[in-house]
Amino acid sequence: MSARTSILFVMLAAAAAATALLWPAVEDAPTALEAAVRDDAPAPPPDAHVDERIERTDRVAVPPPDEDAADCRLRGRFVVPADVEPGSGSWATDGFQRPLEAADGYTFTVPRLPPGVHWLGAAWRAGGPRLEVVVREVELAPGQDLDLGALAPEPSRPARLRIEPRLLPGGRVFSPQELADAGLRGPIGLVIGSGPRRNAVQFPVGGETLLRRVDVPVGVDVAVHGVPAAGIFVAVEGRTPLDIRVGGMQYFLEPRSEPQHLVAGAFLELTLDYVLSCELTLHVTGPSSGAGWIELHVIDPPSGRSIWQRWATAEGATRTVSSLAGEKLLVASLVDAGGVTRAFARQHVRLGATQQLATLPLQDSLPARGTWDGMAPGRRLQIALREWPRNPLWRATVGDGGSFTVEGLPADQDLVAVDERRVLPVRVQRDGDELVLEIAPR
């Protein structure tokens, strides 16, 4: 045998031995370590050699994939009139919207739907002006291929819908030129939804979205055909201009209300309320107690939202804030360096001009003591104005017997105590230069 052949045999033998070490036979008996783990012996320490570390896991049977999870199909054709406005049609399943194509004969196909209940919606604009809608609730069995055939609007009494921009205060309707100047002459997007259901994209403020945007003319009555017996819910779509200029003045769109219910044969007006932007210059007067700051809140009473400013007393007593027109509650506090309210003012004002002035006279606050029956020591107490309970302005900690103290409270204001989500009445009495408070649980 040659030397070259001998070397070849040695290399083959070494490779076989290495393979045996790396891939032991399936029939090999378990090692002592594996046997110990199966017998619930203590596991190796975390710092054991990597070859000795064993990770114990609970094995869970994984079910095979459901072959019927998305094997349904929905087909059909929308019956669209000859006077349809080109490009105005769209359709959706479960809120996922697509354009309605005339080139396809207004047919649609939705493959790979899961079994269960689905919503189908479509809408288009036509002459009149009118808006035609199709709403269907469809339930699919596993594996079902459902052809809905020709789908036309339901033969119900037409409803009427109007989207009307208004200028506040006063509620004045836009002139045609003002609509054009504000960029509101063109169609406004409308969201159409159904009542509360499952299995679909959620409609704003409850329910389900059928169509995310259907363009509707502004400032005219639109006949709505095909409204189902249960009605539909409509709201102005979110991309409506948020601020506009009319006559050189700036207006902001008031936050929208909840979707409105439109039923067959009824009339519904959706208003776009643009509110005048006002500049309010406030002058705070009254006692001065040295270093500290003034805290100012301009509050919108219906919503409870506020504009907040704070500045040092050394920076003066006048500030200008921008706010929307309407009834406002003004609240000002003079707070010392230790966070104690030394003086306070509250006043109502009605904004209706681009520039207005108001004076807030501060009145001295008084120290207060009180009791909160049944409350354990250490409980946090919050006190707020009765007109503005969502934002407590004063805080204290309850001591023994439910007692508490507040270093500075206004003497002539209606107050409430806020305990988590409860608003509790506060009885206030004056005892010389001190206020006595009593909080009675409801």
Image (cartoon, helix red, strand yellow):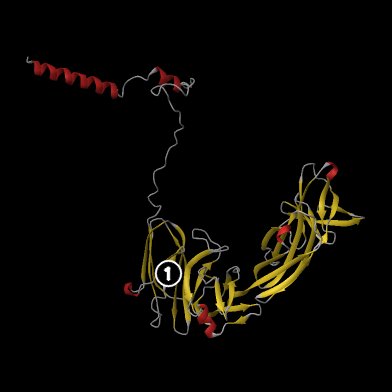
Whole-percent x, y for residue 18 in the image: 25, 21
Q: Foreground residue, 133 or 212?
A: 212
What residue appears at the point 53 percent right and 67 percent down from the top-left corner? 194
Residue 231 can be seen in this image: no
Q: Residue at x 83, y 47 (%)?
A: 404
Q: In this view, does 60 lie to the left or right of 420?
A: left
Horizontal side of residue 264 vs 334, given as left or right? left
Give the image quarter of residue 427: bottom right
Q: Quadrant of residue 329?
A: bottom right
In this picture, residue 2 sits left or right of residue 177:
left
What residue is at 9 percent from the left and 18 percent from the top? 4
Residue at the extreme left: 2
Q: Please name the residue that numbered disc 1 is placed on.
A: 91
Q: Which quadrant of the view contains residue 253?
A: bottom right
Which kind of residue does numbered mark 1 sit on?
Trp
Secondary structure of the residue carrying tag 1 is: strand
As displayed, is residue 25 above or below residue 387? above
The percent position of residue 308, horizontal first and vertical second, equals: 67, 61
Question: Where is the N terminus found, in terms of image quarters?
Answer: top left
Residue 284 visible (yes or no): yes
- Name the foreground residue: 241 vs 70: 241
Residue at x-position 52% and y-position 59%: 198
Between 347 and 139, the one lying in front of the other is 347
Q: Quadrant of the C terminus?
A: bottom right
228 horizontally vs 336: left or right: left
Is the residue marked by circle 1 packed among few (<14), some (14-19), or many (20+) residues within 10 Å?
A: many
- Report the front residue among 244 and 28: 244
- Residue reaching furthest to the right: 432
Whole-percent x and y of residue 282?
Answer: 72, 68
Q: Position of residue 415 (x, y in %)?
A: 80, 58
Circle count: 1
